[in-house]
Image (tube, grey):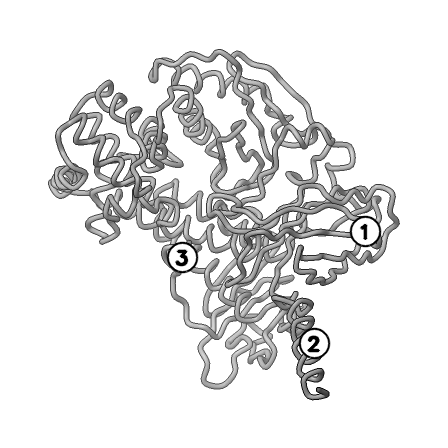
Amino acid sequence: MRRLVTVHWLLITCLLVACVAPVTPPEKFSLITHPDGRLYVGDQVSFEVMMPSGFKPEGHEVQVSLGDKELGRAGFGPYGVAGRTEATLWWAWDTRDLQPGPETLTFTLLPDGLTWQETVTLQPQSGVPPPEPGAHWAVLTSDCCILNYITGTAAERDIASLAQVADEEAADLSARMDESLSEKIPLVFMPRVLGNGGFAGNAIYVSYLDNDYLGNATAQVLHHEFVHWFDTLAGGDLRPTIFQEGLAVYLSGGHFKPEPLIPRAAALLELHWYIPLRTLADEFYPQQHEIGYLEAAALVGYMVEAYGWKAFDAFYRDIHATPDGRDSQAIDTALQAHFGITFTELEGSYLELLKGQTAPADVRDDLRSSVQFYDTVCRYQQALDPSAYFMTAWLPDYMMMIQRGIVADFLRHPGGMDNRLIEAMLVNADHSLRAGEYDQAERTLKGVNVLLDVLRAYPNNGMQTSVCPALRTKVRVPEGFRIGAYSRKIKTFRRVCQPAGSSYFAVVMVASGYHYGQIPPPIKGAMIFVSQLKYGLHHNCR
């Protein structure tokens, strides 16, 4: 009898342990807070809680508490273009009644009961960076649009000219797409880079700021996003992404600048970058950004040329989902109904056209440099500004921001030395690219990627500060590296932070710009980053 009782107690104990044991260690859940950067007293803070791989989110939610007070809770679901599974708690923590200093937040996974804590330090409200303390939302109404912007920003300064550009672009598309506006388009100007500069949803969101490393191509971006708006008004059932984005680039005459679409698409074949259309149709956004948009736009252009605008538009509006859920199959069905051809046959004739083209050298060079540029932008955003990365960009509802009086989510962004250096280099690369100086653009992008290599291999906690007598300043170098020989006479380094037997590359930051190369120039007040990694361009950033 005693043995039976002991067995029963063991079974009960095991069941109790199974019920209360954490399903997943808390360190495997990752947290992002918004606004970006430091948090200040008065902020309305949002949380993104990302689950670890292997975790099944069904039936789970995250609760956030401060002491005994529950701040909010949210279930797990897809977020952003990528559909990343996370729990998103929008503006759950109002800090206006708190004091500066550390605060401990408790996160609880329900219904499992797994709990972990995060410490967040609130800075004094007096330290909020300008122009935020006096900034607020303002509105201007134009012929086409309701323009929403934040005071104290570049958009406020240029709002009259922005309204004129918006009216011109909207009028052009209204005529070309034969669609009229029954209501004005809500337009939101964001004073920071998010994604690739534009989004269309419940409004059109466009980045507008000085020294935009994506190029300040405001008219082009507005035109692209307006196409999406008018496209939605025109209706249709499925409207596959390959045609939504292809139509926007086609009607805008290019992606981020005017471009010859067919010759440019032909260059994809020469560079061996062509993506099979079925793959592009079924998995559009995971493909390399510039290649996918270009290929889709050239396809739309080919179909409009072959069948006429009205026939293409009728086909596009008549695509319906199929049981297998694949866009490629839905497109195939609609092609057979409207043109009597399969998707495979369409691709065959499209490829025949492209193969008959000879891409000029400058078109090929521009495409190659453009792909490198946007891959590098993608890599930078993922590494140092994840809220800006287009697949998971932090894009709050502007109407809720206006209602709550929030401007910080759009005004704040990472502004550390690394961000400032890389964004300055990207601005220069964009200028070189648009000027047709492709070799210079690629050299600059090489420097950016080297610096990103350094920051990935030697994060801040793996860096040490050393004194550089030649430049009379301190430099950041990876642990284990040393300052190499230098010449006081000519004030240049012969070797920089070079351990025996390792290759190196230096990026020098100065007030007026940057320099990278094997031997830095004689510049005072420089900051040097050194990599022992060999450089390699990271293509097809996802």
Using the rendered view, name the quadrant where residue 430 is placed: top left
- Numbered mark located on residue 123 in the image: 1
Residue 280, given in percent of the width and then of the height, sits at: 30, 45
- Numbered mark located on residue 443 in the image: 3
Q: Is residue 361 left or right of residue 533?
A: left
Can the viewer see residue 442 in this picture?
yes
Q: Quadrant of the C terminus?
A: bottom left
- Numbered mark located on residue 330 in the image: none
Residue 527, given in percent of the width and then of the height, sits at: 61, 63
Q: Is residue 352 above or below residue 496?
A: above
Determine crowd level at label 3: few under 14, some 14-19, many 20+ residues with C-alpha closer than 10 A: few
Residue 77, given in percent of the width and then of the height, sits at: 55, 47
The three-letter code of the residue at mark 1 reads: Gln
- Say which label, 1 or 3, has the lower sequence index: 1
Q: Rounded to the nearest whole Å, what is the CA distance between mark 1 and mark 3?
A: 40 Å
The three-letter code of the residue at mark 2 reads: Thr
Residue at horizontal 63 percent and vertical 26 percent from the top: 157
Determine crowd level at label 2: few under 14, some 14-19, many 20+ residues with C-alpha closer than 10 A: few
Secondary element type, mark 3: helix
Residue at horizontal 48 percent and vertical 31 percent from the top: 200
Residue 181, given in percent of the width and then of the height, sits at: 46, 13
Q: Rounded to the nearest whole Å, what is the CA distance between mark 3 and mark 2?
A: 65 Å
